[in-house]
Amino acid sequence: MPRAKLTTKKLAERIDLNYFKHPHPLRRWRTILSVAMPALALLWLLWIAFTHNARVYSSGRMSASHAVLTARCDECHVKEAGSFSAAAEDRACAACHDGPIHHANQVFTPKCSGCHVEHRGPRRLAATADADCAQCHADLRTSGAATGFAREIRSFGAGHPEFAALRPGSTDPGTVKLNHAVHLKANLLGPNGPVQLDCDDCHRPPASQAAWRFAAPQPKPDAAPAKDVPPSRIAARAYMTPIAYAKHCIGCHGLQFDKRFKESVPHDTPQVVHAFVVQKFQQYIAEHPAELRETNSSRDLPQRPAPPSPRQVTPQEWVAERVAESEELLWRKTCKECHALSVAPGAPLPAVAKSNIKPRWFEHAVFSHDAHRLMKCVECHAAAPSSRETSDVLLPGIRSCRQCHHPGGDAVESRCFECHTYHDWSKEKAVKGKLTFSHLLHGD
Amino acid sequence: MRIDRTHRAWLIASMVILGAATAVYIPYAANSPGGPSGGSPIGLTFGIVGSAFMVFAGLLAARKKVALWRLGRAQAWMRGHLWLGLLSLPLILFHAGFHARGPLTAVLLALVIIVVASGVFGAALQHYIPNVMTSEVPFETVFEQIDHVRSQLLAESAQLIGRVSAPLSLVVAAPSGDLAATADAALGAEEATAPLRDFYELEMRPFLENPRGRNQRLADPQAARGIFKGLRVLLPPGAEETLKSLEEICEEERQLRRQARLHHLLHDWLMLHIPLSFALLLLGAVHAFMALRY
């Protein structure tokens, strides 16, 4: 008997009309999994709560300097009673860090976390993005007096002006005359014959242990670095030792004043020099009273008859004459070799202009010679070997820096923080630490 | 649901939303000090909108459960589920700034990618599989009833074999008075149908009883044709109707198997998509709470 033709009706007749009352395994498993997966997630969260492991909620790894606080979320995320939020506020940062204000006339103060972004992995928190600085400096506005700073700086390569010391009309304010070209030439006359000076015969960081070639036997100790150098940059290798006569000049530029004395006058004010010279001559004439009777043989010039009789002067007169001669030499030649002297009408002694040698040229940036020790001095200070005027500014320009400091994988750091600091560290206040080992490591 | 012309408005709206979101994100990411952050106002907006889209997509399950819940047509909900669910991925990526630095956020990002990807996969299957089903499974039945239909096929085939094998049928059909001849004829008929019985016992019944069996020749249409062709040679012409019926039953079984495979292909991805989406919604809510708090 042939099989009945399979029509739609025949097919439909096969269906158990109550099939929907019995869940199919596929549907059942879907329901089970739909409950199991969220349940699993909930179990995970409960386990986290039970083990107090809040790190799972962290938005990223801590920076290297804060890594010790990874398990101590509440050190920064302080929840006030009755408040929902436990965001890391500035007061949490202030518990360990003092962040002095940048400028008194800034129009807004960003939050600590606005620039120092945590939970971004093991990176330097001080390595802030240019955009953090450009928040203000891309369109600089100030409260109060107008600023002299450039108004549209976005980065070192975009809008950063030429260094202030090199802008048109800027000169070295130093008054000590120095001709670099002469000092760096070959076969310069030295104390013991010809010498060839090198840059580091005069320019070295204080931490340098090498002896100064042309220094006095016991030079004065070095001056401290400038006060507004940030803590991270205080190093006796960043800036050069200020130029000092006793270290750098005395070897060749002696201050002899009279052939009777081997020693030089002290490198000091005219008043001190005068007192020294007077004292020396007084001492001398007390020991050599015979010189009070002058024969002037050294002044017996040809075709000029000798005076009728030798002079007899008092010690005071003798000292005064010798002092005058010596000071004539000093004020008109020796000291004037390097210094600018001026004599006010009626003044017994000249005034020496302050040397004004700048120990640090970048007043609003930091620079470390130590970090750049791989470079030859003249690569950056290219104008030095040919400089003849004191007023020449021998700093490298911004173009020189940009050769290495620019964005890109094959260049060195060029973000703002590399040279500039936001916080005015001269206003830093000490912070008293409060953490203990038991709290930090065990949460006690 | 097939994505056809009726989705045009949704497509356009989604493209506009995506375009606007991208236009906001690019300058925001470029100009943010420290990079884009989920906690920034713009990042938070992306997160809220993306989460809202995910919640809406998740509510489809509720809408389906409560058929009487007359808040829009089911089709509209389904379209919304597709398009807003798809949009939630780029919005969440914009919210995260394409980063997932923490454990929970990493899990969430993985979940949202898996859920959306599985959804896209499922939506793509929806365009292909039904056509295949129509062309390759003309005897399509209700999936949940496949086993029930299969049991009916088994019973029918057993009945057919029983009829063919029964000597009584020949005795009943034999001319009256000729019993001995009939008995002889019956014995001869039994011997003649032995190949069919052997085939049924050795091949066809296991084929019908064990849909997951391996190395079943009847599972291959060409091999099955060859088997039945051989049986036709061996069996008397009287068995032709039975053979034809058995062949149809085998074809039905093959279609049932094909239908089951296609059904699994069309629906198994939901085993991943639905449970993970519930987990995603739960963990997402926890993340939102904790992130806003801290």
Image (cartoon, coloured by chain):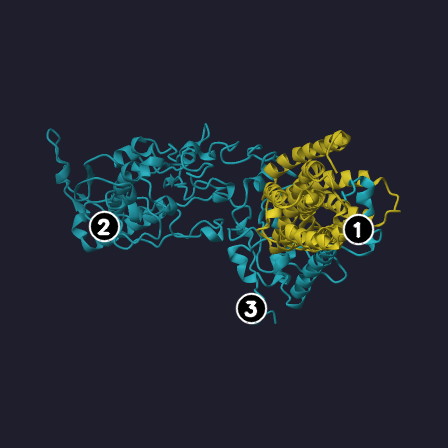
Chain colours: A cyan, B yellow
Q: Mark 1 highlights which residue?
A: B176
Question: Disc 2 residue type?
Answer: Glu
Callout 1: SS: loop
Q: Mark 2 highlights which residue?
A: A263
Position in image of residue B246 (x %, y %): 69, 46
Identify which residue, B235 or B246, lies in the foreground: B235
| Mark 2: few/some/many CA within 10 Å (<14, 14-19, 20+) | few
Q: Residue furthest left?
A: A302
The chain letter under disc 2 is A
Q: Nearer the viewer, mark 3 or mark 1?
A: 1
Is residue B40 visible in the rendered structure shown here?
Answer: no
Is residue B50 visible in the rendered structure shown here?
Answer: yes
* Horizontal relation, residue A401 to residue A441: left or right: left
Q: Are marks 2 and 3 in one subunit? A: yes
Identify which residue, A242 or A372, lies in the foreground: A372
* Residue appearing at x 82%, y 50% in the figure: B65
Q: Mark 3 highlights which residue?
A: A441
Task: Measure how far apart labels 2 and 3 are at the Cα level.
Answer: 66 Å
Identify which residue, A169 or A33, lies in the foreground: A33
Quarter holding residue A32: bottom right
Callout 2: SS: loop
| Mark 3: few/some/many CA within 10 Å (<14, 14-19, 20+) | few
* Horizontal relation, residue A176 to residue A58: left or right: left
